Amino acid sequence: MHRIEGYVIVSSDGMIADASGQMPDAIHNDADQKYFQSGLDQAAVVVHGRHSHEGGLRSAGRKRLVLTRLIATLAPDPAHPNSLLWNPAGCPLEEAIAALGVGDGIVAVIGGTEVFTMFLPFYDAFHLSRAARATIPGGRPVFDEVGPHVTPEDVLARHGLKPGPRRDLDQRAGVTEVTWEREARR
Ligand SMILES: NC(=O)c1ccc[n+]([C@@H]2O[C@H](COP(=O)([O-])OP(=O)(O)OC[C@H]3O[C@@H](n4cnc5c(N)ncnc54)[C@H](OP(=O)(O)O)[C@@H]3O)[C@@H](O)[C@H]2O)c1
């Protein structure tokens, strides 16, 4: 019923944030932001962990689920309009989406590490942007398994996703995007 799509920008070493959980400027890119925000505009619901948020002028209008273990199942989210706090251990995704009053459409998963990893068996597509000139030594990986010998691409391939063509989002900055799709569900 719901198509599940991930969105991320990683450094060349597959990191989404530094060791302290901050997203460094080296992986912020305006062209990627435009691509990301346009993608979220197509989504029925945005899903992320309690320390993540896409920001931007249109974010308040989006329906969202914010993962947290501070509650058992579902609860109102005092911090964000149109949002519910969600603990997946106590409430299935489809139930949480129904509680938001959202119909069919795309579920956009936007991190962080544990959330990206949890959805690996379920992605229909994963939009992997890369800032090839940035490295974040000791940073937080996009997926738990990513490390010196395992790339984000290795992990996506292991979970049955196949890469589409690479596109330049910002050639001068060395920022590219590849959409990985689950072949069997095309
Ligand atoms: N480069 C990118 O594209 C990108 C994407 C996303 C995030 N980031 C950056 O990464 C950093 C944050 O990442 P993060 O991994 O630390 O944070 P995060 O996933 O946003 O938040 C972690 C919190 O989410 C909750 N959570 C996560 N998995 C859960 C689960 N399975 N069940 C219930 N609750 C769950 C927990 O909240 P409680 O503590 O409340 O239980 C956990 O402490 C930020 O700097 C953010 O900007 C970058």
Image (cartoon, rainbow, N blue to C red):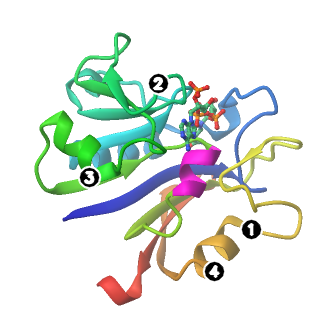
Main SS class of the magenta portion in the image: helix
Q: Is residue 175 left or right of residue 149?
A: left
Tell me which segment is drawn in magenta.
113-118
Query: Do callouts 3 and 1 mark residues in contact (Cβ within 8 Å)?
Result: no
Density class for disc 4 (Cα within 10 Å; few <14, some 14-19, many ≥20) is: few
- Cα–Cα gap, marks 3 and 1: 30 Å
Viewer-side label of 2, 3? 2
Q: Is residue 3 magenta?
A: no
Question: Where does residue 39 sit, x and y in percent of width and height?
Answer: 30, 50
- Cα–Cα gap, marks 2 and 4: 33 Å
Of callouts 4 and 3, the N-terminal one = 3
- Cα–Cα gap, marks 2 and 1: 33 Å
Q: Is residue 43 left or right of residue 10?
A: left
* Quadrant assignment, res 179: bottom left
Viewer-side label of 4, 1? 4
Density class for disc 2 (Cα within 10 Å; few <14, some 14-19, many ≥20) is: few
* Amino acid under disc 3: Glu
Give the residue at mark 2. Answer: 71
Give the residue at mark 1. Answer: 151
Density class for disc 1 (Cα within 10 Å; few <14, some 14-19, many ≥20) is: some
* Amino acid under disc 4: Arg
At mark 4, the secondary structure is helix
* Amino acid under disc 1: Thr
Question: Where does residue 178 sit, x and y in percent of width and height?
Answer: 50, 68
* Amino acid under disc 2: Ile
Give the residue at mark 4. Answer: 158
Q: Is residue 171 visible?
A: no
Give the residue at mark 3. Answer: 94
* Quadrant assignment, res 26: top right
